[in-house]
Image (cartoon, rainbow, N blue to C red):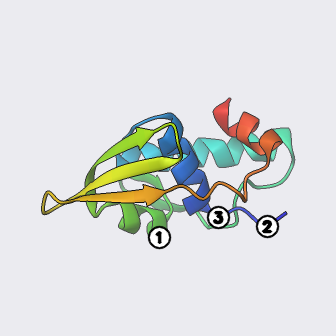
Amino acid sequence: MTEMRAMDVSEYILRKQLTGNLKLQKLLYFTQAYFLIKKGVPCFSDKIYAWDSGPTIPAVYRYFSRFTLFFAFPDDIYIVENEDGTLERRRYNTETISEYDRKLIDE
């Protein structure tokens, strides 16, 4: 199985729960901690930094800060609204997340 990245986990979380960037960062932090407790290994390899606004994965934060809203659909498609008001359609890539890991993230 391919190693998970924080971006893959972010997209999976957004598919389940619409949220803003700061809350997403906190959910990633808790997911990482939960994996360390349950499996003894990290969920993803990206480093988490302590920013003034809380735990942050800079690459994920920068990527999602371009958008003001996230809209999710059950067929692995999500729509993001850019700062200029244009909508962009994306497809989730959750192939790197095993069924067991998906259950842990959902918890």
Residue extending farthest top = 107
Which residue is located at x 79 percent, y 42 percent? Answer: 99
What's under tag 3, amino acid-wise?
Arg
Left or right, 36 with respect to 52, comes to right
**Label 1 – label 2 distance at C-alpha:** 19 Å
The N terminus lies in quadrant: bottom right
**Label 3 – label 1 distance at C-alpha:** 11 Å
Q: Where, by quadrant of the figure, is residue 30 drawn?
A: top right
Judge depth for marks 3 and 1 and give the one in front.
3
Residue that label 1 marks: 59
Q: Residues within 10 Å of mark 1 (few under 14, many from 20)?
A: few
Q: Is residue 107 above or below residue 7?
A: above
What's under tag 1, amino acid-wise?
Ala
Determine whether the residue tagged by mark 2 lies in a helix, strand or loop.
Answer: loop
Nearer the observer, 41 or 70:
70
**Label 3 – label 2 distance at C-alpha:** 9 Å
